Amino acid sequence: MSYSIIRVAKVKGKTNTTGIQKHVQRENKNYENLDIDLEKSHLNYDLVNDEPIEFNSMIDEKIEENYTGNRKIRSDAVKHVDGIITSDNEFFNFKSQQQIQAFFEDSKQFLEDEYGKDNLLYATVHMDEKTPHMHYGVVPITDDGRLSAKDVVGNKKALTEFQDRFNQYLNDKGHNLERGESKHKTERKHKQVERYKSETQYHGKEKNKAERLAKDTERKVRDKEQLLKRYDKQLQPMKKQYDEMKNEVDDWEKVKIPKLKQKAKELNNQNAQESRKIDDLKQKQDDLISTFEKIDSDIEKYKEQREHEKALRDQIRADKEKEEEQYQNLVKVLNEPINDEYEYEYKKPSIFSKEKEPTGKVIISEDDYKILKQRSALAARLEPTFTELNSGKERKQDKEHIKRLQDENSKLKKQNKKVANERDEVIREHKSDISLVKSGCKIIKKAVGEDVYHKGINMIDNKVKSNFKDKYREMVTVDDNDKRMFQRKDNEVKRMQFENSKMRSKGKDKGFDLDR
């Protein structure tokens, strides 16, 4: 039966602790111990730390956290206790990695129970040497918070009891190990490896062990061969099934797959034809859009011309009304009766005549004379205009101008009616084309699938101008799924615009930063 092995030793000074760190964590490139296989060092693991640590720094941290003594720690105080746990090769042979790790996990639990979990520095398992073993390190802090390696490690008797407890703990866990013989009972000292191997006939034992291992391996090989024969017998039906499946695969490769490829080729050709049809329809749609734009432009020009003509007519009408008003005022002035109170002028024909004779003249007041003079001047100024108006020449010119405007207006109405008819015809053709486009879209969607179809129409939608988006979406929307796809896209665009506006508003008025 195999033995349980646990050893413990005090480590004095940070230099020795650093040396142990380099060995435990494999920080050196070369080692004198020939049993170390650096190519297997990646199999090593630490049950306490996930990453390599710096032993001296970690020791100081644990003392800072757990030391509660009143005295100042001496500079030569032992702060590190190192130990090793293992067994012999017979114990580890034919154990899985999980079983080996379980053994060391139980050993680590024993150490935590003995020393306290907070005082355990590392528990590193070495799988790159001949025999798996675990190095462990402890900060010697007592239960009452003192730093004392003497009390934690104890004397010879305490060490013997410690090893007894370890062996019993492992057996309780089901590992079935014997207690190794204490060096204190045999009063033997530790010997050098080579000396130990020589005295214990190490190589002979190893040879016997290898022979036993070879025989055991031969037995296992025979068992494996018998097992393989049974498996081969069991595999016969499976081989038959495999052959049938292989024939089916060959049939697919030689017959069915070529047919599917041909069908795929035909579908690709059909898709190419449909794509060309869509391109033609898009070109026709672009032409229709250009026609609509031209018609809209002509209508806008016609509206502008009508507004101009209307403004011109209104201006002529206003001018005519103003002239008519002035004319009426003048007529009123001319028709207003003049004050006819006057006296005839009488004079003596000679100085010797007794009777006065009428001179044919009248005498009026000075105010009446002034009014009469004013009206006479006004009449003289208005006489040419009155004569021209009375002849009807000016009104005839206005009538001719109005008639020309009416003729032009009539022509514009005819043109507008013609343009409206053309537009109605284009709209009817456009509706027919939309129906044709929708039919083509249905065929394409059915051929390529909804996801691919949505990607295609969405890509085109991103390039269509905003004033034509509604018309485009009307043409390519085949069912409610397409409509919902565009609605989700519009909602997402609105959400992004809202988020951007919030970000811009947050970025405003940040104040003045003195550090800048």
Image (tube, helix red, strand yellow):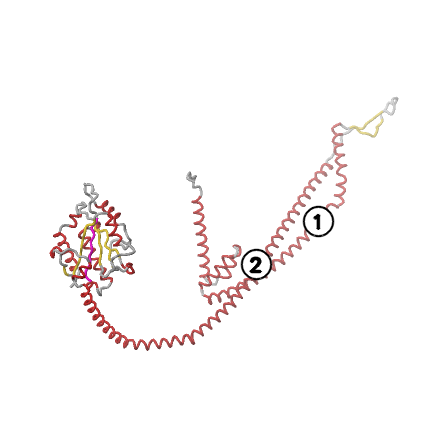
Is 417 on the left or on the right of 481, as rendered?
A: right
- Please state, as top left, top right, bottom left or bottom right, where the N terminus lies in the image: bottom left
Viewer-closest of 39 and 415: 39
Question: Mark 2 Cα within 10 Å, few/some/many (few <14, many 20+)?
Answer: some
Is 217 on the left or on the right of 465, as rendered?
A: left
**Mark 1 sits on what residue?**
401
Viewer-closest of 230 and 394: 230
- Say which amino acid is labelled 1: His
Mark 1: which secondary structure? Answer: helix
Residue 377 rendering spot, x and y as whole percentages: 76, 34
Is 491 on the left or on the right of 374, as rendered?
A: left
Residue 236 rendering spot, x and y as whole percentages: 30, 77
Question: CA gap, disc 1 to disc 2?
Answer: 40 Å
Above or below: residue 188 compared with residue 150: below
Question: Mark 1 Cα within 10 Å, few/some/many (few <14, many 20+)?
Answer: some
- Please state, as top left, top right, bottom left or bottom right, where the C terminus lies in the image: top left
Residue 404 rendering spot, x and y as whole percentages: 70, 51
Above or below: residue 164 compared with residue 355: below
Residue 244 forms part of the magenta stretch: no
**Mark 2 sits on what residue?**
289
Viewer-closest of 181 and 383: 181
Q: Are marks 1 and 2 in contact (CB under 8 Å)?
A: no
Magenta segment range? 80-88
Residue 87 rendering spot, x and y as whole percentages: 19, 60
Q: Residue furthest left?
A: 185
Mark 2: which secondary structure? Answer: helix
Main SS class of the magenta portion in the image: strand
